[in-house]
């Protein structure tokens, strides 16, 4: 493929589930095509405004936010911000002259991709979930390519635009060589004991946390050990409650795990929400997992993500409403069942896509090249 000095915009964010794939695609582009210039467009005040520069890329922000479903009267200002974001996105595109614009989901991707389509610039959507969101369904009409992680997405998008690529995962996870013993020792735990990793996302998950707090006696008697990421919102309160209980050396508690490659290596079983990015990591790393989908996400897409695995006998599903009573007991039974762990690991591995970022990067480059040639 001939080399061109192409410019690419990558837009979206809001959560790690959008930011990690975006950065992975950017890294794959820079690795394969070093001459490509990349600009990110995010939402002001959201985590991408810190995470993207930390990854070494330039980002510009739009004053966009989500609809307030509890207070509809406040949505007038949201609409004004959306319109303003569209004009700012148009100016960014006009000034930067991109050859392709990539949307990874999140507030900023809507106005950015919409404006790019209106201006005749090819767009690529990276849809992480098994159930497409409203914004991506609307943007699909103007998109040239839609990269998806699940089969059957022609329910939402034009079939001729779809590419089954999987979701890009963080490079440090894909390339890790850390052993289980090294991972467990990083948390000061015992390599001879079965280990459960509990993650509720960087902000935490109240239901999953309550499921542990409610059964501390069971944790103490179980003979297993737990690495528990509480999330920053709940960390202090959980420590206060644990301090009123007797010491539990088998429980490693933290608000945030920065080196997830160590935590995954340590884990014989993972308990997690069912975000698309996390699920892609579990597939690539062959991790047995119990999924507790969040009921507080648009279109209940986490339940759809979880069922896509459960229907392949590749994960265990516990409803959020049932978790406080049943989750911990089921996790302890599962982590002690060697055959079940092996079956879950083997089945989830069949759903993995190991080179998603590279495949998407090639497609972005191809669109940019076509656009340049058509302009001549």
Image: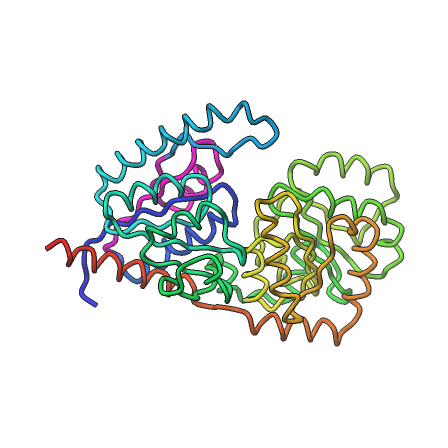
Residue at x-position 27% and y-position 59%: 365
Q: Is residue 192 above or below residue 19?
A: below
Residue most toward the left?
Answer: 376
Q: Is residue 376 above or below residue 241?
A: below
Question: Per the image, is 52 magenta?
Answer: yes
Expressed as whole percent of the image width and height from the top left, the position of residue 200 reads 66, 48
Residue at x-position 86% and y-position 37%: 244
Image quarter where the C terminus lies is: bottom left
Q: Quadrant of residue 289?
A: bottom right
Image quarter where the N terminus lies is: bottom left
Residue at x-position 78% and y-position 58%: 225
Residue at x-position 52% and y-position 60%: 173
Q: Nearer the viewer, residue 15 or 149?
A: 149
Q: Nearer the viewer, residue 159 or 294?
A: 159
Q: Which residues are magenta?
A: 35-60
Q: Nearer the viewer, residue 363 or 217?
A: 363
């Amino acid at each position: 493929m001939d080399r061109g000095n192409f410019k690419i915009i990558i837009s979206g964010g809001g959560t790690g589930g959008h930011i990690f794939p975006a950065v992975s695609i950017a890294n794959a582009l820079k690795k394969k095509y070093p001459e490509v210039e990349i600009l990110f467009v995010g939402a002001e005040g959201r985590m991408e405004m810190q995470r993207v520069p930390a990854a070494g890329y330039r980002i510009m922000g739009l004053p966009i936010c989500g609809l307030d479903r509890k207070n509809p009267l406040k949505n007038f200002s949201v609409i004004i911000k959306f319109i303003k974001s569209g004009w700012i996105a148009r100016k960014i595109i006009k000034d930067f002259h991109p050859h392709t614009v990539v949307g990874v989901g999140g507030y900023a991707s809507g106005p950015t991709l919409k404006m790019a389509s209106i201006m005749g610039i090819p767009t690529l959507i990276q849809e992480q979930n098994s159930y497409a969101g409203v914004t991506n369904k609307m943007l699909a009409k103007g998109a040239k390519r839609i990269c998806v992680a699940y089969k059957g997405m022609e329910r939402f998008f034009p079939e001729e635009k779809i590419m089954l690529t999987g979701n890009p995962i963080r490079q440090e996870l894909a390339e890790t060589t850390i052993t289980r013993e090294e991972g467990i020792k990083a948390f000061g735990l015992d390599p001879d004991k079965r280990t459960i990793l509990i993650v509720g996302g960087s902000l935490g998950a109240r239901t999953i946390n309550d499921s542990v707090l409610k059964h501390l006696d069971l944790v103490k008697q179980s003979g297993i050990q737990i690495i528990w990421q509480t999330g920053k919102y709940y960390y202090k309160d959980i420590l206060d409650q644990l301090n009123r209980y007797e010491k539990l050396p088998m429980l490693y508690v933290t608000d945030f795990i920065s080196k997830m490659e160590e935590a995954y290596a340590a884990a014989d079983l993972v308990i997690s929400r069912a975000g698309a990015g996390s699920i892609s990591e579990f597939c690539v790393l062959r991790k047995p997992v119990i999924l507790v989908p969040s009921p507080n996400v648009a279109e209940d897409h986490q339940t759809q993500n979880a069922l896509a695995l459960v229907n392949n006998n590749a994960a265990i599903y516990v409803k959020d409403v049932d978790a406080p009573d049943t989750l911990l007991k089921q996790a302890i039974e599962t982590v002690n069942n060697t055959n079940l762990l092996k079956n879950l690991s083997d089945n989830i591995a069949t759903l993995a896509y190991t080179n998603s970022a590279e495949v998407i990067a090639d497609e972005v480059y191809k669109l940019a090249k076509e656009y340049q040639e058509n302009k001549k």
